Image (spheres, helix red, strand yellow):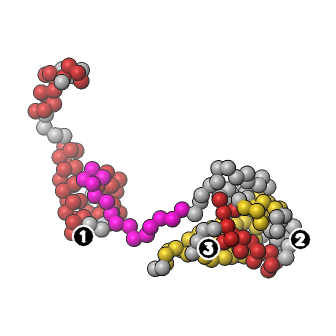
């Protein structure tokens, strides 16, 4: 085995007899404390709370070290919140050109609208919210809520903004995400990164 691994036989036996380093011994003691604290929390606590418990006990240790030892012992904290992805890109879709180029300033109302989607966790599930914000006044001019992430969610928010403000010409800027890459506004524009409405 030593020949295959290209290790000297004497080096292998010296490694077998070597006493663990002070850091390894300290990790073993700390790891046992972490396991006990995690069991005491009914296996709920993650690294931040276990780190705080250790601090309360007078053990001075970094949070990254606690996380590393948790990972070593196969300990995982419980998260109440399930994650939800709202950014889904469509690789085949052709987005509108970026007319804004990261300059989100406007000199008057209804020149530039920016749009985004977020979600709110509720007891009944996720509630998705699409908003259209006027970059000049920082005011929400259109919004829509739904329990789904379909294109009509963002179109309802845009249609509300158009109905409320009735702009002559406005740039509508959004992410390159699936829900904004749809035909809208009676076929006049393709909503994408930036589009003139």
Residue 65 in view (yes/no): no
Query: CA–CA distance between discs 1 and 3?
Result: 35 Å
Rendering quarter of residue 133: bottom right
User: Which label belongs to residue 170?
Assistant: none
Find residue 16 and report its horizontal and vertical position in percent.
13, 32
Give the residue at x 17% y 46%.
25
* 23 relative to 58, above or below: above
The quadrant of the picture occupied by the C terminus is bottom right
The question of residue 84 being in magenta is answered with: yes
| SS label for mark 3 | strand
Find residue 196 and report its horizontal and vertical position in percent.
83, 62
The mark nearer the N terminus, 2 or 3, is: 3
User: Which label belongs to residue 168?
Assistant: 2
Give the residue at x 23% y 21%.
4
Rendering quarter of residue 188: bottom right
Q: Which residue is mark 1?
A: 42
Give the residue at x 25% y 53%.
73
Give the residue at x 20% y 19%.
3
Q: Residues within 10 Å of mark 2 (few under 14, many from 20)?
A: few
Query: CA–CA distance between discs 2 and 1?
Result: 60 Å
Find residue 142 and report its horizontal and vertical position in percent.
72, 76
Judge by depth and name the residue closer to the eye, 190 or 139: 190
The quadrant of the picture occupied by the N terminus is top left
| SS label for mark 2 | loop
Judge by depth and name the residue closer to the eye, 74 or 13: 74
Judge by depth and name the residue closer to the eye, 186 or 45: 186
Rendering quarter of residue 184: bottom right
Q: Which residue is mark 3?
A: 129
Tell whether 107 sits left or right of 30: right
The mark nearer the N terminus, 1 or 3, is: 1
Magenta highlight range: 71-85
């Amino acid at each position: 085995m030593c020949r295959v691994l290209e290790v000297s036989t004497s080096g292998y036996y010296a490694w077998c007899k070597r006493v663990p380093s002070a850091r390894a011994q300290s990790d073993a003691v700390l790891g046992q404390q972490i396991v006990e604290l995690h069991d005491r929390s009914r296996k709920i606590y993650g690294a931040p709370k276990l780190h705080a418990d250790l601090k309360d006990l007078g053990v001075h240790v970094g949070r990254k070290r606690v996380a590393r030892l948790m990972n070593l012992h196969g300990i995982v904290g419980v998260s109440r919140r399930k994650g939800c992805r709202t950014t889904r890109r469509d690789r085949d879709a052709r987005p509108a050109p970026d007319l804004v180029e990261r300059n989100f300033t406007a000199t008057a109302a209804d020149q530039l609208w920016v749009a985004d989607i977020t979600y709110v966790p509720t007891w009944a599930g996720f509630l998705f919210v699409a908003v259209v914000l006027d970059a000049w006044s920082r005011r929400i001019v259109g919004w829509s809520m739904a329990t789904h992430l379909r294109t009509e969610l963002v179109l309802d928010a845009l249609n509300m903004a158009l109905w409320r403000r009735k702009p002559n010409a406005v740039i509508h800027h959004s992410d390159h995400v699936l829900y904004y890459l749809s035909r809208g506004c009676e076929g006049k524009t393709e909503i994408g990164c930036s589009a003139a409405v």
